[in-house]
Image: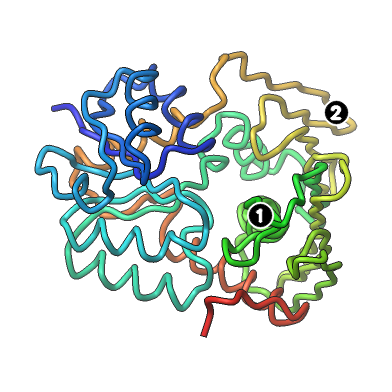
């Protein structure tokens, strides 16, 4: 059986997903929808997708589609996931799966009621490099993990009409790239949180363009996470243990990880040319073929915890989007 996909949204992230999907053996891109018929048609022609829609509602009513990849801007995720679930479609939704944990609770309940697969597209968790780093940690190769230092920053387009700087589109560093650092922290420690401390700088448009947060876990582990839309940071994750460390350059799209201890220095390389969205797409197909309703790698409870951390960070820094009640 082949899993048929629809792509909801035809922007930059959808293009990356469709590009990597070309090597996914157990699925087919059947349809794409955009608010612009021209944009949808051009996308479909570029990726050899049979059907192109100018209406999201029309696409999700296609009975041949098994699962929809939601690739719209953050502010629309809640609405568009609901649209898919109400029409009987399983969902892989781009991160963050919703703007806050209250929204996610509603989506989780709906997915459960409909008995449909639902997962956040935290593609980083499925990358071979990250899975290798996780394996090293579980094997105790760096001893007891004590600290994580992670940064992700670049010079973003801060034009007020663009996505990153627009509060109406849930822009800002935290939801766009800070989520990767938080997700890495949750992958490394996976423990109950003791405290969160956050700082941020705000742009003229009212979004966080720089932020820094510290998370302390009840087992003593500590994470320092920085994200920026105003400057290029070191863009790496360094995991420190009592016996050594693991260094992961460009951790969110990792191709390399280095294990460094007194006894050994090992470099893991993923030499595949794809960015890595293919791994999560393949995993979703396999889970759907098994009639699963969520992923053991990225369960909804994990997404909920990550969102709850971001909720607390936004509470501390005073960030609320115009469309939130």
Mark in front: 1 vs 2: 1
Q: Quadrant of the N terminus?
A: top left
Badge 2 element = loop
Rendered location of residue 152, percent (x, y): 78, 46
- According to the picture, the residue beneath numbered tag 1 turns out to be 161
Badge 1 element = loop
How far apart are the two marked residues, 1 and 2, measured between alpha carbons? 53 Å
Pick the residue in front: 29 or 240: 29
Write down the quadrant of residue 189 in the picture. Answer: bottom right
Residue neighbourhood size for the residue with mark 2, other residues' Cα within 10 Å, grouped as few (<14), some (14–19), many (≥20): few
Whether 198 is drawn above or below 300: the answer is: below
- According to the picture, the residue beneath numbered tag 2 turns out to be 263
Write down the quadrant of residue 129 in the picture. Answer: top right
Compared across the picture, whether 188 is left or right of 290 comes to right
Rendered location of residue 240, percent (x, y): 83, 48
Pick the residue in front: 241 or 91: 91
Compared across the picture, whether 133 is left or right of 213 comes to left
Write down the quadrant of residue 257 in the picture. Answer: top right
Whether 315 is drawn above or below 270: the answer is: below
Rendered location of residue 44, percent (x, y): 33, 25
In the rendering, which numbered label is found on residue 97?
none
Give the residue displayed 67% in from the left and 19% down from the top. Answer: 269
Check the image and tell me how it is coloured: rainbow
Residue neighbourhood size for the residue with mark 1, other residues' Cα within 10 Å, grouped as few (<14), some (14–19), many (≥20): few
């Amino acid at each position: 059986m082949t899993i048929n996909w629809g792509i909801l949204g035809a922007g930059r992230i959808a293009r990356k997903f469709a590009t990597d999907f070309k090597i996914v053996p157990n699925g087919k891109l059947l349809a794409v929808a955009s608010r612009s018929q021209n944009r949808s048609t051009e996308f479909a022609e570029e990726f050899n997708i049979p059907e192109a829609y100018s209406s999201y509602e029309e696409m999700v009513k296609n009975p041949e589609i098994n699962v929809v990849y939601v690739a719209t801007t953050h502010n629309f995720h809640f609405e568009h996931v609901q649209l898919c679930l109400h029409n009987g479609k399983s969902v892989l939704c781009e991160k963050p799966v919703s703007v806050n944990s209250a929204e996610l609770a509603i989506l989780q309940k709906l997915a459960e009621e409909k008995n449909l697969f639902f997962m956040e597209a935290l593609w980083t968790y499925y990358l071979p490099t990250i899975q290798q780093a996780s394996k090293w940690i579980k094997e105790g190769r760096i001893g007891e993990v004590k600290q994580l230092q992670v940064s992700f920053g670049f010079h973003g387009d801060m034009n007020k009409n663009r996505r990153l700087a627009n509060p109406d589109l849930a822009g800002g560093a935290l939801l766009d790239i800070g989520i990767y650092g938080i997700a890495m922290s949750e992958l490394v420690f996976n423990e109950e949180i003791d405290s969160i401390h956050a700082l941020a700088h705000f742009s003229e448009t009212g979004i966080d363009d720089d932020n820094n947060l510290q998370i302390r876990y009840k087992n003593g582990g500590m994470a320092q996470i920085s994200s920026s839309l105003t400057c290029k940071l070191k863009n790496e994750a360094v995991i420190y243990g009592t016996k050594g460390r693991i260094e992961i350059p460009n951790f969110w799209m990792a191709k390399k990880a280095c294990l460094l201890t007194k006894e050994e220095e090992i470099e893991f390389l993923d030499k595949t040319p794809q960015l890595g969205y293919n791994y999560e797409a393949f995993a979703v197909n396999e889970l759907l073929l098994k009639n699963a309703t969520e992923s053991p790698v990225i369960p909804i409870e994990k997404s909920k915890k990550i969102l709850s951390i971001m909720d607390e960070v936004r509470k501390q820094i005073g960030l609320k989007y115009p469309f939130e009640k």
